[in-house]
Image: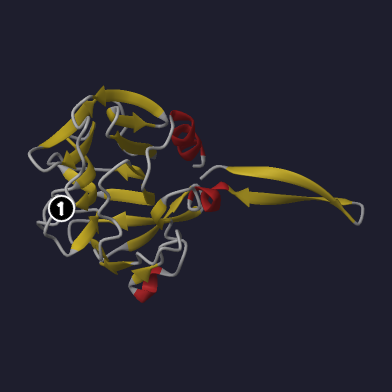
Amino acid sequence: MRVAAVWVLLSGCHLIFDLDQRAAQCKVSGIQLCLTFEDDLGDLETTDDSGEGNDARLLNVSPAKHNGQGAVSLEATSKIEIENMGALDVPGPLTFDAFFRWLEGSDPQAILDNFNQWGLGVQSGVEVSCTLGFADFTFSILVGGNFVPGRWHHVACVFDPDIGTQLYLDGVPIKTDPAGIGKMVRMNGGAPFVMVGSFNSGTGHFLGELDDLRVITRALSSDEILAAADAE
């Protein structure tokens, strides 16, 4: 997370105050989920910093650091689950994004998965994907060769029923697909949890680190996506 430095003159001395841009990203209009992992992960739960109450339960998750701030490290036995009470069933418009640091593996790995509705993931080590489920079909945007294993990256998927779907990496749009124009995301995928770092099926465990996962009930603009990516 990138921070801004402000100089303040106090009692003849300059002091630096770091302004946490991450907090601002958790308060954008339409926010439904914001997991920053700044709390004590030892209590097996992490707070939803959006204030919407979508707290997550943790299993075999280790604390990590992302530019000095809290993050999580996941392995093949890790599980992060958010009880799905309907707040994250969003028909559209819809934005979901995250920071990720992928380390290993070749099979598809999930970053976010709301079963049969929407999801983010990586596969083959260098491909990022966005999946959306509609009433009559499910489709995925898959783009390869755009991220570096072992580095932190920001990925975002933006769905607008009037425009289609855009996939962003590090604040830059890498693919736009008209699939979904005039459609709405299906509202009941049939799973009790939204999963972080794995699929609802129990497969696709993300092997690496995650941070700042968000779900927003509107289509963010390209400037807003860039601001989120820059708030590293």
Vertical position of residue 128 compared to residue 51: above or below: above
Asked which colour scheme the image uses, the reply is secondary structure
On the picture, is 99 further left or further right than 180?
A: right
Q: Which residue appears at 44% of the width and 53% of the height? A: 65
Q: Which residue appears at 44% of the width and 35% of the height? A: 225
Dividing the picture into quadrants, the one containing residue 220 is top left
Q: How many marks?
A: 1
Image x and y of residue 191, in percent: 13, 60
On the picture, is 158 further left or further right than 31?
A: left
Asked whether 204 or 156 is in front, the reply is 156
Image x and y of residue 224, in percent: 48, 35
- Taking the view exactly as shown, the residue that stands out farthest to the left is 136
Image x and y of residue 203, in percent: 11, 53
Please say whether residue 206 is visible from this viewpoint.
no
Asked whether 161 or 10 is in front, the reply is 161
Image x and y of residue 98, in percent: 36, 45
Residue type for callout 1: Phe
Q: Which residue is mark 1?
A: 115
Dividing the picture into quadrants, the one containing residue 200 is bottom left
Q: Which residue appears at 50% of the width and 36% of the height? A: 227
Vertical position of residue 177 compared to residue 69: above or below: above
